[in-house]
Image (tube, grey):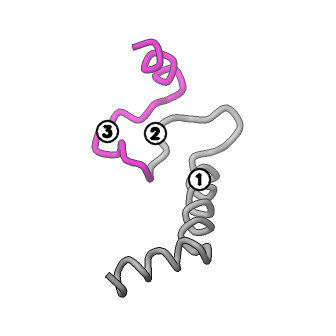
Amino acid sequence: TPLFEKLRARNMETDWTRFDCYTPVFDHDTLSREELAELRERAFTRYYFSPSVVRRIVRRFFWT
């Protein structure tokens, strides 16, 4: 696909087992793979430890 060809030019990962929602699989224009991983981790932590999400998870698993 056109997107695949565009990303292949950006040193795209060739190990298909690494294509998950956690591993950066191509080189970004301005961010390193380490920076992308750090941003992903911060976003997940910020979302999943927000009071509203914690409350929803606790209700789902302990009061249903």
User: Is residue 8 inside the magenta stretch?
Assistant: yes
Residue 47 covered by magenta stretch? no
- The mark that comes first in sequence, 1 or 3, is 3
Start-end of magenta stretch:
1-22
- Give residue 64's position: percent from left, percent from top: 31, 81
SS under mark 3:
loop
SS assignment at label 2: loop
Three-letter code, disc 2? Val
Residues at discs 2 and 1 in contact (Cβ within 8 Å): no
Local crowd size for mark 1, using a 10 Å CA cut-off: few (<14), some (14–19), many (≥20): few
- Whole-angstrom CA distance, mark 2 to mark 1, is 11 Å
Q: Which residue matches tag 2?
A: 25
Rendered view: 29 above or below 59 = above
Q: Which mark is residue 34?
A: 1
Towards the viewer: 35 or 60: 60
Work out whether residue 45 or residue 57 is closer to the camera in this orientation and state it: 57
- The image position of residue 45, as x and y in percent, is 57, 69
Residue appearing at x 46%, y 39% in the figure: 25
What residue is shown with label 3? 15
User: Residue 31: x, y in percent?
Assistant: 67, 42
Quick one: which residue is furthest to the front in this view? 64
